[in-house]
Image: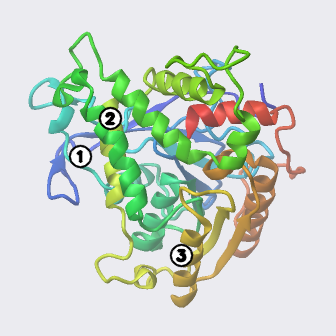
Amino acid sequence: MTTNTVGAVSTQYFTFAEDEPFCLESGESLSPVTLAYETYGALNADRSNAILICHALSGSAHAAGYLDGDPTKLGWWEDCIGPGKAFDTDRFFVICSNVIGSCYGSTGPASIDPGTGKPYGLNFPVVTVGDMVRAQVKLIDHLGIDQLLCVAGGSMGGMQVLEWAAHHPQRVHSAIPIATTAHHSPMLIAFSEVGRQAIYADPAWNHGAYYDQPQKPDAGLAVARMVGHITYLSEESMQVKFGRRLQGLEKYGYEFDTEFEVESYLKYNGHKFTRRFDANSYLYVTKAMDYFDLTQPTGSLAAAFADSTHVKFLVISFTSDWLYPSYHSKQLVSALTAAGVDVTYLDVKSSWGHDAFLLEVDTMTNLLGSFLDRLVREEHVTAPAGYIPHARVTPATTTALARTQLADNLA
């Protein structure tokens, strides 16, 4: 177990759009819509200490603590959320919700279509990052919060952060986009499409209608995950972790068995992923990421933040991240600066690749904690009743190896 945990937590559910459909950017609509979410800590008297955490592609609302009291079900950002940690739950009210289109309790393609009584499958409408965030706005309204102190997240979570700041700036004081981009490059869209094609090619996919079938498109989803997982790593981290070592062999077998450790690792993680994620959700969420483009409709990224001049930004990138290289964040910082936004930028030296936002815990604790300290001072945020100031902590019991295993599960 890690130290300074929020302890046992349970998933909560918020349902809306029961009487009036939730309109999507595509022109389609959903009714009703359910969001799965978790909260940690307590609201202060004026409800000004709320922080929204946004998850990555395959993440969930379970960001911290032990789900239903099970210590093996660790939150995906446990190292950064908890008493005394970067997102100090003694000081802040922290919220994390599962995006629509996913498969961890929020409405998605595996949900029951009220019109047919069967899972939506591909009848589920295409959703965008904008749709995901507008659903989160409904949740924040439901929780009685007028303005969030901060919205933070990495990777696809960072896209949601940017969407909040660009299109709902009146609802946020600050934004922390980490290891992310304002729009996918053609190369990133290409990687997404390879993963989708792997799922399409699986005979068990059956054009998305597999929920009542004995066979699921696990082979296709596993390959999609393997391709995606490679992009989360770096050449240096793979060299250190695997090198050219053989898996339980002294020499090459000169056949097509799994011989190299890196092969075994990818296969294991690919197949493990199929036990916790839905193939159709993978299609929908990756497509939402590909559609995301804050330069539209004006063609200018700076114009997207014209109404966000009061929002304070902390932008973080990592030197070895080749999925969302540092230049993506630098372009974002240039646009924010041109728009007159208060922005702090840090390009963190790391060998962990894209997964660094989950693994560079000490650095992230210092960066996030210092930024939030500044916000508390400048926004005059009071702590919840009974708060006793204490030193910031990092989870010393979590080893680098344990963190890489956690990233294998959660990126």
View extreme (right): residue: 391
The residues bearing labels 3 and 2 have C-alpha atoms spaced at a distance of 32 Å
Please tell me in which quadrant of the rendered image residue 42 appears: top right
Image disc number at residue 119: none
The C terminus lies in quadrant? top right
Circle 3 residues within 10 Å: few <14, some 14–19, many ≥20: many
Q: Residue at x 71, y 33 (%)?
A: 242
Circle 1 crowding by C-alpha within 10 Å: few under 14, some 14–19, many from 20: some
The correct choice, above or below, for 341 with respect to 274 in the image is: below
Question: What secondary structure is marked by label 1?
Answer: loop
Q: Can see residue 370?
A: yes
Question: Going by the picture, which residue comes out furthest to the front?
Answer: 254
Q: Where is residue 288? Give x, y as percent.
A: 33, 53
Residue 100 appears left or right of 117:
right
Q: Residues within 10 Å of mark 2 (few under 14, many from 20)?
A: some
* Residue 198 numbered mark, or none: 2
Q: Which mark is residue 17?
A: 1
Mark identifier at residue 332? 3
Q: Are marks 3 and 2 in contact (CB under 8 Å)?
A: no
Between residue 301 and residue 132, name the one nearer to us: 301
